[in-house]
Amino acid sequence: MYSYKGLEEKLRERGIGRSDLTKLLGISSRTVAKIAKGEKLSPAVTQKLAAFFSCEPADLVREISDNPILQILREEKAAKISGGLYHELQVRMTYNSNHIEGSRLTEDQTRLIFETNTLDIGDGVPVDDILETVHHFRAIDFVIDCAEEPLSEETVKKLHYILKHDTKDSTLDWFAVGEYKKRPNVVGGRETAKPKDVPARMKKLIDDYNSKPEITVEDIICFHADFEKIHPFQDGNGRVGRLIALKECLRHNIVPFLIEDGKKAYYYRGLSEWDRERGYLTDTCLDGQDTFKKLLKTFEIEFVD
């Protein structure tokens, strides 16, 4: 559903009604009816309305989700509210996800970057650690914006691009930012999918997942394990995989799981042993879900347990 409260306010300020838009802007009566019903408008129509009222599209319309967690994240993101769920998700997920992959930034440094866009650091912190922290903030924003859209290869590649563009890796000819890997790689001593096999395996993984009549948290964990086994990108797979999990939890009204750096050994064991024993990774992710539930309780946000 979409709220056109901002548009209604603009109409009142101008002293005109919705039906007047058909004459003023050439908008069809069918489109006007969509506004009344709270349905989605095309980007072209939204841009036309924004130009007419000399404002941003977000000032006229906003999406309303049935998922209370996603709705709160969107509202706090749009209003730039400090100290709420959106704020803490950004800091905690970015710090933990990057630290799992070897970032040297502390949680306090990560928080400072998010809150002030500045950083007070000592010697020895790689520039890429800072860039990828800022990029991860933007990647979470992207997840919140597109959470309710079906999962696609385009979305997966976009997440990788957001994370890795402008980093040192992006200057390497063989490193495909926002595209599947060109060179074979080994992770933890285990072979991953060959580059030539990645497109077909990713398509099948996503198609099989999207074909499920109902998605559970166990399905999302399974997708995450299979995604990491394919390891479709040259680097950044763990962070992309955890962002996909966040998106899919928000899409299916499931409390997300937040894997903390302190649980890294259990998390890696779960991925490594997935084909033999699925309980390790499942338990670690459900523990991460409990971590997120505690965060919701801190802000007195109700959720279905």
Image: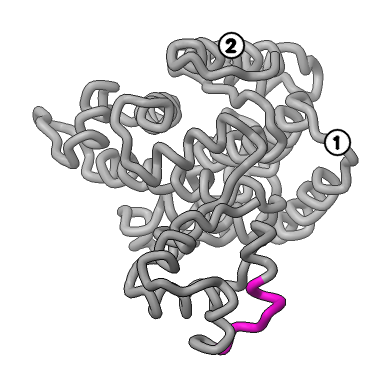
Residue 28 is a magenta residue:
yes
Circle on res. 90 = none
Circle on res. 290 = 2
What residue appears at the point 71 percent right and 61 percent down from the top-left corner? Answer: 196
In-front residue for pair 39/115: 39
Residue 245 is a magenta residue:
no
Q: Residues within 10 Å of mark 2 (few under 14, many from 20)?
A: some
What residue appears at the point 58 percent right and 23 percent down from the top-left corner? Answer: 257
Q: Which residues are magenta?
A: 26-32
Tag 1: residue type? Glu
As drawn, is 92 to the left or to the right of 209? left
Report if residue 169 is visible in the image. Answer: yes
Alpha carbons under labels 1 and 2: distance apart = 22 Å
Residue 66 at x, y = what percent? 66, 38
* Secondary structure state at the residue bearing disc 1: loop
In-front residue for pair 123/193: 123
What residue appears at the point 65 percent right and 14 percent down from the top-left corner? Answer: 286
Q: Earlier in the sequence, mark 1 or mark 2?
A: 1
